[in-house]
């Protein structure tokens, strides 16, 4: 089996305090907050900087 060597960059982020937020906030409020966070992260990473990447929740 032939392989292909590629240079990749992986970013792992942990949202500190997210469990506590989940316990204190209404589920819809938490969802909106997290969607906003993930949108900001996606924008900061920029679609031009990556190929086939995604933000996984």
Image: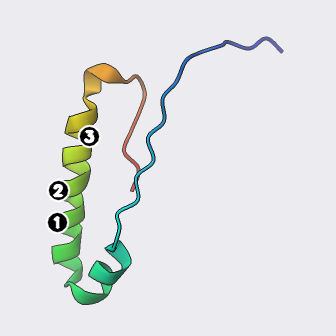
Return the x and y of residue 45 as percentages of the image width and height: 28, 33
| Point 17% across, 56% down: residue | 36
Up the image or down, 31 lies above or below 23; here it is above
Query: Is 7 placed above or below 54 here?
Result: above
Instruction: Say whether disc 3 or disc 2 marks the residue closer to the N-terminus.
Output: 2
Q: Can you name the residue that lies furthest to the right here?
A: 1
User: From the viewer's perspective, is 57 left or right of 32?
Assistant: right
Mark 3 or mark 1: name the one nearer the start of the chain: 1
User: Could you give the CA–CA distance between mark 1 and mark 2, rounded to whole angstroms?
Assistant: 6 Å
Q: Residue 44 sits in which quadrant? A: top left
Question: Quadrant where the N terminus lies?
Answer: top right
Q: Are marks 1 and 2 in contact (CB under 8 Å)?
A: yes
Q: In the drawing, what numbered circle is on residue 13?
A: none
Please name the residue shown 26% across and 40% down the image. 42
Q: Is residue 48 left or right of residue 5?
A: left
Residue 36 bears which disc, if any? 2
Residue at the spot of label 1: 32
Identify the residue position indicated by label 3 in the image. 42
Q: x, y (%) of residue 39?
A: 20, 47
For residue 36, side relative to residue 16 (left or right): left
Residue 55 percent coordinates (x, y)? 36, 45
Mark 3 and mark 2: Cα distance apart in space: 10 Å
The label nearer to you, 3 versus 1, is 3
Spatial CA distance of label 3 from label 1 is 15 Å
- Find numbered disc 1 in the image and state the secondary structure of the residue it sits on: helix
Q: Is residue 41 above or below residue 29?
A: above
């Amino acid at each position: 089996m032939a392989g292909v060597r590629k240079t990749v960059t992986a970013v792992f982020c942990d949202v500190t305090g997210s469990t506590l937020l989940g316990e204190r906030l209404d589920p819809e409020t938490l969802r909106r907050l997290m969607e906003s966070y993930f949108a900001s992260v996606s924008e900061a990473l920029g679609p031009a900087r990556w190929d086939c990447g995604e933000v996984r929740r």
